[in-house]
Each structure stands twice: as structure tokens, then as C-alpha cells.
Image (cartoon, rainbow, N blue to C red):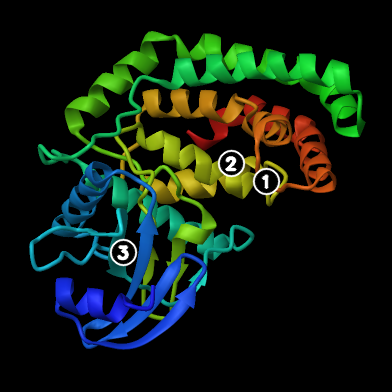
Amino acid sequence: MHDIERDIFSQYKLTVKNIIPDRNGFILTTNQGKYIFKENNIHPGRIMFIHGAKEHLYVNGFKNIDRYLCTIKGEPYIILQEKCYTLSRYFEGRECDFNNENDVKKATNLLASLHAASKGYIPSPESMVKDELGKLPDVFAKRLREMKRMEKIALKRRGKFDYIYLSYVNYFYELGKEALDYIFSPIYSKLVEETRKEGSFCHHDFTYSNIVFSDSEAAVINFEYCCFDLKVYDLANLIRRRMRKCNWDIEEAKVITDEYRKIERLSPEDFYVMKVILQFPQKFWRVANRYYNSRRSWTERILIEKLKEAVDEIESHKKFLENYETII
């Protein structure tokens, strides 16, 4: 990577003043501001889809995003040694704190504004489109099958993690099975069709590290997972992340839905599907999946603690679902 400056100048016509290594790539100080230069392990067609989505948001007034800088050829990426790289705007600031109610309100405002600006997106012909609309039943069903498969593994191993998993897998499986039954409702199909006609998309990774606050602005970055999907996918995940910081306090969830509706409407169908998403035992499945299937270097101690957290939330999560109508 010692030839970054030369490659940047030849393909972007930028003058690089300083290069600093970053966990995601390299932060460049240039004559046109700060950018982050990073390798993307995704197909160029996907980058075209993401680039088009970002430009669509920008044109529609949602401007605080890490737009790709296009090359002199007009492309949002370059190929170096058979690898794909992008150069995008770099935002300096702090990550969103889901323990902080003001941060959560700002994040909710950002999300609603993003969804509102996303409507009407038509990807370019060279884009590799990612469309998750209508796939939730398949996702739930697959994860339920995985829970049963992991149960068989746990029965053979009988370690500390396995013991906890086996003690609660039936409860979480039935909770997920009920969510799967609910999602087969015509309400879900109707919402999928309405969203498809609307042409709106989701960020699909709207987490604390992708929401950046500075003294003067708030920004959303890292759109690598953006796709066509229901807006309540993003909203439900935001609520879930906040709920885990406040013991599933329904009033804190209401703060989020009230803030969201100041900018973007939520229909009865939205609330129905969002409840189903929030009912599915996402954390229990995810932690178990990491333990039994992931190659990442998660230590057993950490994953046991995370599994215990999912178990400890059972009663508060149950109460949340019982009082869900409060947020509508």
C-alpha cells in the first residue's frame, strides 16, 4: 500500500497531504478535505448499487453520508491488484451512545430522514441489486432450524455453554415459532408490496458505530449492507439495541417511535410487523450461532455471558411484548 498517494492522484486527481492508518483502511487528508480509502470485499456491482443509493439520498436532501468520490472515469471504485477500493468522505466525531436518550433521539431522527429520502430509488442497470423484501419468513424458518441443529450439538458436548443453551432453547424456539406463524399473515405481504411500489431501502446496519456525531453535524456511514427492505427492519433493530440498555422499558421504545413519526409515517401494518421482528429471539440465536458456527475468535467466557444476558431478558422482554400497544 506504499503507492496509495500515486494511485489516488492518478485516478482521482487529489493531492494527498497526509495518510494515517485506520482500522477500516487509511484516512487521507487532501486538498479537498478528509477521505477514507479502504478495501471492499464486495462485488463492484454491489458498490454501484450502494453508490446509487447514497447519491439518491443526497439528491433528496439527506446529505450527511459517506458519499463515494468518483474517479476521473466516473466510477465509485478503483481496482488495484485485483482488489476493489473506494474513497469516501470521512466524518470526524464520536459514535452514538445507545445509553444516552438524546443520542437515541438524534439517531432516530437520522433514520426517519434516511427512510424518507430513500423513496423512489431505481438502481442503475450495472448495479447488483440486493433485495430482502418478502424474505423474513425464510429467515425466521432457517434460524429456527439452526436452533434445533445446535441443540443436537449441545446434547453431545454438554459443556457450560451447552448446558445453558439446552435449558432455554425450547422457550426461545417456541417464541420464534410463534413469530414465524405471525409473519405469514397477509399484513406482512401487503406491507412488502407497498414498500416495493414505494422503492424505499434500508441501511440494514444502523448500529452505534455507523452513526457519528460531531459538534456541528450527525452522519450515517458504512452502507455496505443497504438493500431494499421494510423500513421497520431498521427501526426494530434500533429499538432492540436501545431496549437492551434499559431493560426493555416500553416507555423508552415509545420515545423512539414518537420521534420517528415526527418525520416518517408508521402504519398499523408497520407496527404489526415490527412487533413480530422484536419478538423473534434474535440475540439468543445470534450468540449460539457464534458459539457453534463462527470461526471468529470469540472466547467461551464472553459468549456464555452474552447468552446469560439473553436469558436474563426473558421476563422484561415478555412484559414489553404484553405492553406493545403503548407505542402505537
10 relative position to 147: left or right: left
Q: Are marks 3 and 2 in contact (CB under 8 Å)?
A: no
Instruction: State the image coordinates of residue 165 (x, y, percent, origin top left).
Output: 82, 25
Q: Are marks 1 and 2 in contact (CB under 8 Å)?
A: yes
Inspect this view and state whether residue 8 appears.
Answer: yes
Name the residue at the bottom extreme. Answer: 17
140 relative position to 26: left or right: right
Q: Nearer the viewer, residue 51 or 184?
A: 51
Inspect this view and state whether residue 34 appears.
Answer: no
Circle on res. 244: 1
Mark 3 against mark 2, which lies toward the viewer? 3
Q: Which residue is mark 3?
A: 66
Q: Nearer the viewer, residue 66 or 162?
A: 162
Circle on res. 115: none
Q: Earlier in the sequence, mark 3 or mark 2?
A: 3
Q: Nearer the viewer, residue 310 or 29?
A: 29
Q: Which three-letter amino acid code belongs to the residue tagged 2?
A: Arg
Q: Which residue is mark 2?
A: 240
Please tell me how crowded label 1 is: few (under 14), some (14-19), or many (20+) other residues with Cα within 10 Å: some
Please tell me how crowded label 3 is: few (under 14), some (14-19), or many (20+) other residues with Cα within 10 Å: many
In terms of image quadrants, where is residue 128?
A: top left
Question: Above or below — where is 31 with respect to 37?
Answer: below
Question: Above or below — where is 219 with respect to 148?
Answer: below
Q: Earlier in the sequence, mark 1 or mark 3?
A: 3
Residue at the spot 68% in from the left edge and 41% down from the top edge: 248
Instruction: State the image coordinates of residue 292 (x, y, percent, origin top left).
Output: 72, 30
Callout 3 secondary element: loop
Callout 2 secondary element: helix
Q: CA distance from mark 1 to mark 3?
A: 28 Å
Q: Which three-letter amino acid code belongs to the residue tagged 3?
A: Asp
Q: CA distance from mark 3 to mark 2?
A: 25 Å
